[in-house]
Amino acid sequence: MRILGFSKKWNKLSFDSFTTFRFERRDTDWEIGEQVQVVYKPRSKNREVLGVATVVGKNRRLIPSAISYMALNVLPVTDAEAIADGFESVAGMREWLQGTHGKERALLMNKLTLRKIGDW
């Protein structure tokens, strides 16, 4: 079972179903039906396993920038999706992603919908 890590205890983690945006994995990308272990601070000695969830949805999204999402045939992340993910706006989401993962990283992502298994 793979780990799906979070560096912040977002409010959305308290819901039975929630979404998160993740870059495509280099090994094997996330798949619908896959069970994942949801972990807070996965690379820290303060690591906390929150519980297990199943990936129930996966959609490709593009963080709007100078790249044309029309040419890629991928829908852009909306402000509503960014806000539901815990950011103030798409611009704030893009800024955080570029600061964390580097400006050279493509902003083509997976929007994963997860459903908790059991109580956390």
Image (cartoon, grey):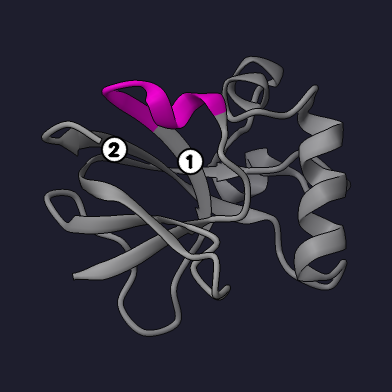
Relative height, residue 40 to residue 87 (above, below): below
Q: Are marks 1 and 2 in contact (CB under 8 Å)?
A: yes
Q: Work out whether 58 lies above or below 107.
A: above
Residue depicted at 69% across the width and 56% down the height = 107
Position of residue 29 measured from the top left corner of the image (x, y, whole percent): 34, 69
Residue positioned most to the bottom = 27
Task: From the image, tell me which residue sits under label 2.
Answer: 114
Q: Residue furthest top?
A: 80
Residue at the disc numbered 1: 20
Q: Disc 1 residue type?
A: Thr
Q: Tag 1: Cα neighbours inside 10 Å, few (<14), some, or many (≥20)?
A: many
Q: How far across and down, in percent of the image, does residue 109 sit?
A: 55, 53
Instruction: Name the image quarter holding the N terminus.
Output: bottom left
Q: Residue at x 54, y 75 (%)?
A: 45
Q: Residues within 10 Å of mark 2 (few under 14, many from 20)?
A: many
Gap between marks 1 and 2 measured at Cα = 8 Å
Dot 2 amino acid type: Leu
At mark 2, the secondary structure is: strand
- Which quadrant of the view contains residue 103? bottom right
Whole-percent x, y for residue 13 in the image: 43, 32
- Label 1 SS: strand
Q: Position of residue 7 (x, y in %)?
A: 61, 54
Q: Which residues are magenta?
A: 11-18
Instruction: Please tell me which residue is depicted at 16% across the width and 57% down the height of the picture.
Output: 34
